[in-house]
Image (tube, rainbow, N blue to C red):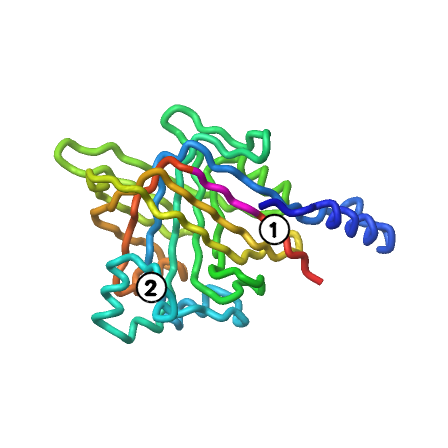
Amino acid sequence: MTFAGTRIAGVATMIAACWPGGLAAQAVLPQDATWTLEGSQGGYCIWYLADPAIARKMVPSSTVLTPAGAGAGLPIILASTIREEPRFAQWIPGSICIGFYQRVSSGNHTLAEGKANRPVILALSSLAAQDAHGVAGASEYLLAFMTDNRNLSSAADRIGVDMGGLEYLSRLRVEGGDAAVTITVDGTQISWSGHPLADSSVAKTRSVSFGYGGPKSADWLVRLESTPAAGRMMVGNLSVDGRNILAKALLASPARAIGPEESGGTITLVFHAVTKK
């Protein structure tokens, strides 16, 4: 699941030789890479349905968004909402997925490593789309790719991928109550208070392809392959605070779902750069 990077480097050399002044002072072209996310300590997704009018403002006008009624695999709450109110079948599925890891590596090289009580956090925000960002086979338009770890952000920058910052705050559970978690994604504050159910089961294998636009004149196919060891359903309350477009999409959603919580197993992210002509 890796891609050859030598030809890309060769193209960069040819362009540098032909372009007036060369490209020596500019950043190198994007490089393909595979990341392995190790020691998963429980990740989950926040799911919602975006009003088509709002979703259209979240992506370029050329994007072909995929309505909820055209696909499968939605959380039970969202699927039930569509069955009860068929008009929501035209709304666009969106998700914000966040994972907690002990280590992120590429080959034999450690990119980022968590500390005691402070894992490496990685999050992705996306909307369902066809050939997202003009990348064939991509079923999700990657709106934001985020981490709270500076080393991981630097590793992403070296291959030509921009990782935004992520604010995360976890409050300890009060006796008799649930733990509270707050994350800030692109200026939108999302708070959740709840807990996973006691019974766990073997989680489903997931394979998701994202179309992404990087900062170094490239489009990307980002593939996530996840085979968790266990999964648990989650219950609780979710609230949203913010005025930007993501907050509007979340607040307008007829229903929101969180979970399941997935832990252990194997997770990889494969980055393939599709350079612009």
Q: Residues within 10 Å of mark 1 (few under 14, many from 20)?
A: many
Q: Which mark is residue 128?
A: none
Marks 1 and 2, how far apart at CA = 28 Å
Q: Camera-side residue: 52 or 25?
A: 52
Task: Quarter of the image for the C terminus: give it.
Answer: bottom right
The quarter of the picture where residue 156 lies is top right
Residue at label 2?
A: 49
Left or right relative to 153: residue 247: left
Give, as a three-letter code, the residue at label 1.
His
All told, the count of numbered labels is 2
Q: Which residues are magenta?
A: 266-270
Q: Camera-side residue: 88 or 21?
A: 88
Residue at the spot x=26%, y=74% of the render? 86
Residue at label 1?
A: 272
Residue at the spot x=58%, y=46% of the render? 1
In the rendered image, residue 90 lying in the magenta stretch gets the answer: no
| Residue 120 image point, x, y percent | 44, 34
- Under tag 2, what secondary structure? strand
Left or right relative to 138: residue 259: left
Q: Main SS type for the magenta part?
A: strand
Q: Is the residue under label 2 in contact with that under label 1 (CB below 8 Å)?
A: no
- Under tag 1, what secondary structure? strand
| Residue 31 image point, x, y percent | 66, 46
| Residue 104 image point, x, y percent | 50, 34
Mark with earlier residue (1, 2): 2
Does 24 sit above or below residue 62? above
